[in-house]
Amino acid sequence: MKLNIRISSGLVLAGLLLLFAVSACNYPTQTPPTSTPDILPTLVATLLATPEATPTQVKPERLLTVCLGEEPASLFPYGDASQAARAVREAIYDSPVDWVNYAPQPGILKKIPSLADGDVRLEPVAVSPGDLILDAMGQITTLQAGSSYHPTGCRDTGCAVTYSGSEPIQMDQLAVRFTLEDGLVWSDNNPLVAQDSVFSYEIAQRLFPRVQAELMKATASYQAVDERSVEWRGLPGYIDPAYADNFFLPLPQHAWGDLPVDDMATAEISSRMPIGWGPYIIEEWKAGDHITLRKNENYFRSAEGLPVFDRLVFRFVGASPEGTAALLAGECDILTETALRGASQEELSELQDAGRIKIAEEPDTGWEQLIFNTQPIDATQPAFLQTREVRQSIAQCIDRQALRASLGLAQQEDMDSYVQTNHPLFNPESRQSIYNTQAAGQGLQAAGWQDADNDPATPRVATGVAGVPDGTLLTLELLSLQDDAHQLVAEAVKDNLAQCGVLVNIRYLTPEELFAPGLGGPIFGRNFQLALLGWDFSLEPACYLYTTEEIPGSPPGAYKGWGGANAAGFSNTEFDQACEQAKMSLPDDPRGIEAHKQAQAIFAEELPAFPLYTHSSLIAMRPDLCELVIDGSSQNALWNLEEFNYGEDCPSR
């Protein structure tokens, strides 16, 4: 009979010794067989070596808690663009492409496609009248008589031609092939294939224009080539330097294929418990409190020991001070930007100096500018800001360093164009606007604005200024949002300009009033003089924001009607040509690099807008957290969430 009894190694040894002691008492003393002395130690050693006899050492489960200032409405990738939703999706999907230092890095892709490797191609295609193209002005239109276009091989702004016939023409079409890593599977162990990315594209088509409108409009086709490869093709004439972002995030066709697209933003399977391929799997979502995730054993980087933590929790906490208190109490390991809203940077710095927390700044999320209306929609208005010398002088009056210090941003560098200083396409040779009130006064004087009473604190007076009646006081209206930060900036600009004889009156508006579209809107209706306006940064320098075709106005005179972004009304032929050349160039094309730098130099000289400071967001964390890498081009501070660690397991410890 076989007994299945678990006993400890100590009891086994004691029992064996007792057994042999009893045997010695019950039997006559005799010389044991010569093999007997070897039996006991062998048997004891064997039993002690049995796995069942050894206490199991259970490794404690490791937990990371990320606290968000808001709860996602939906995790469906095309349903909720909030920071909270993007944070959680980073854990379940993991980006197909990560941007690090403004360069794409492969996530679930085998590599980043390139011209050199042949997976990026410019192919000549036949285009017939009525076909969609990107014309020479950068607009999507149909080929017809009068259309200006770039024929095959035209990689320069000067070689565009006008279509006047009825026969097909040849234009270049950009084709990009993306290949997935080998062996990718969804968290439910089904294979992740190219068709899942095509399925995602088809969903985006159904949701157009709510989803990725610009990319969708420029896409001619998106098809699976084989099980692991897809090919994106743009409209003829469309060149996209950031083509690495044209891969559509795969979605699980095997799980969602029968789900109506209109239900995906709210259905449980796609909005609250979606499957992914990333480092974690959603285990529980307790509304109003938290989302719990566990390690994905099928994660494609699991052989690297990733993710580091067994469990991940996203807690929903209020903004500061509730979030800060939770971090100090050990209830959060990381506080994202939404959980720090309203927090005092001074108090956070004091906590960091005391070693109680660690702060990281996520830079370059956007920039704030003082925009000049160089071309008012009402031609009867005095042309205060038409000349670049006046704009340059006003810029020299503003102490940006003191302004940033008052906002807690003293460590930032001056920006003199729409490109941040750490961007690889930044032009360090562009003109710099340096704070100098004396030089600013001299510049205004030379432009015809006289200091009649020799008192810089009173408004200057026009004398011979083109477009301005003599005797007109240099009085400007500044439009601004009415939140605390914008009020501080507006008042600082007003005080600075008063030192140079420029009187500023501030008008505070709500976002709905300030950004109202069409002729009735103050900014995009070009009914203003000065305005504070913020723009998000993009991966490619956004020179297009200041091109002639982006000037808002009444069609047909304004190319984009009232939908243009160039509220300054700035128009410069050389700038337009440089920007167009930059947009026509693929990465590493010397012509494109030079064109970007030329456009920046023109902008910094002409100053249709004056950069004041860059926007950034703060992240707070436990002081021993490591591997959180802040990168301004990543668009998400949790982009490498799977590598986060803390305590003694950090590499540097």
Image (cartoon, helix red, strand yellow):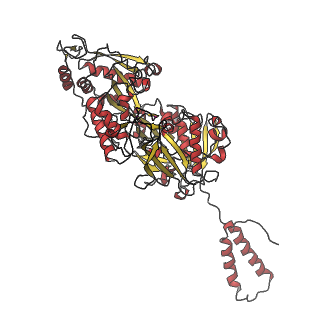
Rendered location of residue 149, percent (x, y): 39, 37
**Nearer to the camera, 590 or 457:** 590
Number of numbered tags placed on the structure image: 0
**Which secondary structure type mostly characterizes the magenta part of the structure?**
loop
Farthest residue, direction right: 1
Q: For residue 241, which quarter of the picture?
A: top left
Quadrant location of residue 191?
A: bottom right
Q: Nearer the viewer, residue 220 or 524?
A: 220
Q: Nearer the viewer, residue 630 or 234?
A: 234
Asked if 8 appears above or below 339 in the picture, the reply is below
Indicate the quadrant containing the C terminus: top left, top right, bottom left or bottom right. bottom left
In the image: residue 380, left or right of residue 225: left
625 lies above or below 12:
above
Q: Where's residue 565, x and y in %?
A: 40, 28
- What percent of the width, then of the height, locates residue 132? 48, 37
Nearest the eye: 40 or 227: 227
Relative placement, left or right, of 456 versus 89 is left
Q: Residue furthest front?
A: 166
> Does any portion of residue 348 appear in the rendered image?
yes
Residue 209 inside the magenta-drawn segment = no
25 to the left or right of 194: right
Q: Which residues are magenta?
A: 142-153
* Residue 311 visible here: no
Q: Quadrant of the N terminus?
A: bottom right
Q: Is residue 145 magenta?
A: yes
Classify residue 286 by image quadrant. top right
Residue at 40% of width from left, 55% of height from top? 116
Q: Position of residue 430 (x, y in %)?
A: 26, 37
